[in-house]
Amino acid sequence: MIRRWNPETLAAPIGTYSHLAHVPAEYELVLVSGQVGVLPDGTLAGDDAESQGRAVFANIERLLEAAGAGPDQLVRVFSMVAGTEHLAGYRTALREAFERWYPRGDWPAQSLIVAAALAKPEILAEVEATIAVPR
């Protein structure tokens, strides 16, 4: 079983993440390339970070399923947001997904950076992930 925790020797996390995530030997790591806010037909989900963020997490759900995993096997999330003005919208989408996936607050490890821009000017959020799939 994947173990996520926050040691008492550190301050509590400032957001929806765990400081540590341990993947035992009976799992294989699967790396998820950066997912952006596009719909299955390739069109952009919207022109705001909240809409794009929702599409990002829907895409990650599809990839988890394709890998034979679920949100419990999501070990690490690395988020990139294009500009501080898009943080609130992205965080709304993240919170919605995490509240659905982790009702007990057993969140994966997570990092977030704010970038000047992403691969294309219209892309406002991108998320990479690491999945631990049982062997």
Image (cartoon, helix red, strand yellow):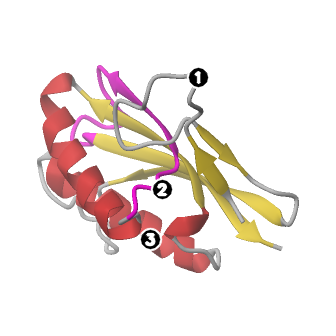
Q: Which residue type carries mark 1?
A: Thr
**Residue occupying the point 40% across, 63% down:** 102
Q: Image quadrant for the C terminus?
A: bottom right
Q: Quadrant of residue 37?
A: bottom left
**Residue occupying the point 20% across, 34% down:** 87
Disc number lying in front (1 or 2) = 1
Asked whether residue 38 is in view, the answer is no
Residue at the farthest right position: 25
Q: Image quadrant for the N terminus?
A: bottom right
* Magenta extent: 104-124
Q: Which residue type carries mark 2?
A: Asp
Mark sitting on residue 121 = none
Locate residue 127, reporting x and y percent: 43, 46
Q: Which residue type carries mark 3?
A: Glu
SS at mark 1 in the image: loop
Locate residue 107, reporting x and y percent: 47, 52
- Which residue, given by chain and number where applicable, does mark 3 sit on? 61
State the CA–CA distance, disc 3 to disc 1: 33 Å
Disc number lying in front (2 or 3) = 2
- Which residue, given by chain and number where applicable, does mark 2 sit on? 106
Magenta residue check for 51? no
- Which residue, given by chain and number where applicable, does mark 1 sit on? 9
Dot 3, crowdedness within 10 Å: few (<14), some or many (≥20)? some
